[in-house]
Amino acid sequence: MKYVLVIGDGIADEAVEKLGGRTPLEAMDCPNINRLAGGRLGTCQTVPAGVAAGSDTAILSIFGYDPRTCYTGRSALEAAGMGVILKPGETSLRVNLCALEGDAFDGAKILSHNGGSIEGEEAVELMEDLVRDPRFASLAAAIGFTIHITPTFRHTGVIDAAHEPDRAGMHFTEPHNILGAQIDRYMPTGVLGAELTALMRASFEVLRDHPVNRARIAAGRLPANCIWPWGPGSAMALASFESLYHKKGSAVSAVPLVWGIAGLCGVDTPRVDGATAELETNYEGKVQAVLDALAGGADFCCIHIEAPDECAHAGDVEGKCEAIRRLDSRVVGPLLERLGKIDPEYRVLLLSDHPTLLSTRGHDGKAVPFAIYDSTNPGEPRKFDEKHARATGDFLAEGPMLLRALFA
């Protein structure tokens, strides 16, 4: 039997006035997802009580790891996903390229946590020019800070062991939780707070008038004009996925966070050309990568779709609904059509890792709906949404119960 985990990042939500008081899942007609709900339908508490809600803690939990004991910070996972394995004493930071409004750093508002969805050569050029800037380089060297660049808005910074900070004394605000707010009262505080704030200010002064950003503004796009460090982490170790479940696994995603979790537990992480964390991504290529992994000997494969989460962070109701529609038609539908050709006996688990609320544009830690479909006992299709999942009374109290249920 083959097993597939489909994570629609942030698809769960609360009632939205623009959707007539319904959640996006309630408002959508998703026939393929509804087929999955013909199996087991319920809710699961993927984020443990007292743990910050996010894809890092939720996906660790879904994969079977307790974030209360193993979690050392989001950036450590993203660093691992980029092939940066932290050494003892090193501290990693998530480094976003963000979009700030205006020409002055003081009093600026944050408009986008992802630099207006910047990616590719533009992101690389901006970051390479930034780290080469003499003033920025001097400030970074003073705290042993190195930035590992990616072709996305997500980058990873590492503070070397010689400047080993007290990670518990570092305080940051996640940029996607303060969109539209003035940044002044959300600067890093505590250990190295002043030094990291100086780096942010310097990055704005370097990137504000960069040719890439002038061209983006002229084209009606947001500039990626400031770095935003957050999510400190340290080296993390995870028990192997195969030792937990006796299954060989693979994980298909476009984000370093998922690559990092998968890589640290020994799950393969094939890269897909054209795969992004945005609404426009190579859905077909990601589905093919799942099928190739299963046909090539993997017992289990996870496919992670980030777009609903990104649209919710942007407050984009139509975008989130369209992301769910594409999850249904371009991911779940093709999987159901083609999995049986690899093995007629297969199971599919679909869920939201956590809710991402359009009302707040942030994450939430409430229980999420899940569905487990079994090709040998498919059941009649039924609506997959928060309300119908709660109505079944089938509740899993913790994330690690999900894969145990899938493999049962």
Image: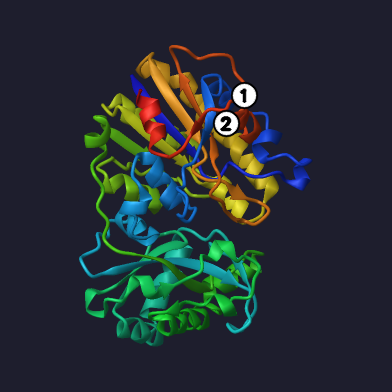
Vertical comparison of 119 with 125: above or below = above
Question: Where's residue 32, x and y in %?
Answer: 57, 24
- The amino acid on which the numbered mark 1 sits, given as a three-letter code, is Pro
- The amino acid on which the numbered mark 2 sits, given as a three-letter code, is Asp
Query: How many residues crowd mark 2 within 10 Å: few (<14), some (14–19), many (20+)?
Result: many
**As rendered, which of 244 and 112 lies closer to the eye?**
244
Vertical comparison of 160 with 282: above or below = below
Residue at 51% over, 20% down: 39
Decide: marks 1, 2 in contact (CB < 8 A)?
A: yes
Q: Secondary structure at mark 1?
A: helix
- Is residue 227 toward the left or the right of residue 279 in the image? left
Q: Secondary structure at mark 2?
A: helix
Q: Which residue has dot 2 on it? A: 328
Residue 288 visible in this rendered orientation of the protein:
no
Q: Quadrant of residue 240?
A: top left
Q: Quadrant of residue 328?
A: top right
- Is residue 22 toward the left or the right of residue 109 in the image? right
Question: Where's residue 374, x and y in %?
Answer: 45, 18
Residue at 72% over, 46% down: 16
Image quarter (top left, top right, bottom left or bottom right) of the N terminus? top left
Query: How many residues crowd mark 1 within 10 Å: few (<14), some (14–19), many (20+)?
Result: some
Q: Which residue has dot 1 on it? A: 31
Image quarter (top left, top right, bottom left or bottom right) of the C terminus? top left
Q: Residue 386 — which label?
A: none
Mark 1 to mark 2 CA distance (whole Å): 7 Å
Vertical comparison of 365 with 195: above or below = above
Residue 122 visible in this rendered orientation of the protein:
yes
